[in-house]
Amino acid sequence: MRFFEFPVRKTDIPEEGQLQFIEAERQVPFPVRRVYYSTGVRAGYVRGKHAHRSLEQALVCVHGSVRVALDTGIEKMTCILDNPARGLYVGPMLWHTMTWIQDDSVLLVLASDYYNEADYIRSYEDFLLLAGQRGGA
Ligand code: T46
């Protein structure tokens, strides 16, 4: 799994909290064309369940905690995102699911391209076939 660490600006004043920032093509290696975020999701709910043909993304849990499972078609990996200063890279041809651990966790996503339903592979069977053709399974 590939993670990005984001700069954190913090003072000695606890009430002030901290500020994290992400710059396209600096803290994440790709140009960012789209930002989206999921809110109001209840604990236990599973989102995702798809792969992308070419999209590159960085997933950041800016509040709460979310478990992310990645599947290359051969290898499966999981991690917990609970640090707003850390992003998970999700590149093309990775089946991914995100399970909300805490109510109202906010998952922020930086994406390399605009929304395009044609870039999604939403059937796991199709994903395994395509991953096999590309040498992933
Ligand atoms: C991903 C994971 C991490 C849009 O119209 N525009 C958008 O930019 C997005 C992201 C979604 N939509 C529509 C498509 C669906 O009709 O919103 C609906 C819900 O999308 P979806 O079920 O794909 O949401 P998630 O949370 O399962 O997946 C999302 C992203 O769609 C996906 O690219 O990698 O977050």
Image (spheres, rainbow, N blue to C red):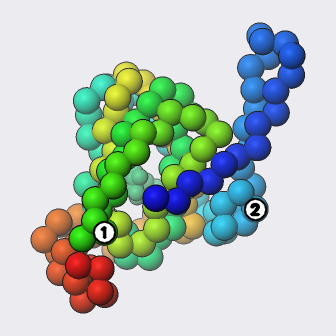
Badge 1, how many Cα within 10 Å: few under 14, some, many 20+? some
Which residue corresponds to the image point at 22% horizontal and 83% vertical from the top-left? 132
Image coordinates of residue 114 in percent, x first then y, are 52, 66
**Above or below 103: residue 93:** below
For label 2, the residue is 26
- Left or right position of 96 against 26: left
Which residue corresponds to the image point at 52% horizontal and 38% vertical from the top-left? 61
Q: How many marks?
A: 2
Query: Does the image show residue 78?
Result: yes
Image coordinates of residue 31 in percent, x first then y, are 66, 68
Q: Secondary structure at mark 1?
A: loop
Which residue corresponds to the image point at 52% horizontal and 59% vertical from the top-left? 2
**Above or below 130: residue 96:** above
Asked if the residue under mark 2 is in contact with the one under mark 1, i.e. CB atoms within 8 Å, the reply is no
Write down the quadrant of residue 94 in the picture.
bottom left
**Above or below 126: residue 82:** above
Q: Secondary structure at mark 2?
A: loop
Q: What distance separates the C-alpha of mark 1 from that of mark 2?
A: 26 Å
Q: What residue type is disc 2 on?
A: Arg
Q: What residue type is disc 1 on?
A: Thr
Sequence order check: which comes first, mark 1 or mark 2? 2
**Above or below 128: residue 37:** above
Query: Residue pushed farthest right?
Result: 12
Return the mark for residue 72. 1
Q: Nearer the viewer, residue 134 or 1?
A: 1
Query: Does the image show residue 114?
Result: no
Image coordinates of residue 103 in percent, x first then y, are 37, 22
Can you say which quadrant of the picture contains the C terminus?
bottom left
Query: Residue pushed farthest left?
Result: 125
Which residue corresponds to the image point at 57% horizontal and 35% vertical from the top-left? 83
Write down the quadrant of residue 74 in the picture.
bottom left
Image coordinates of residue 22 in percent, x first then y, are 71, 50
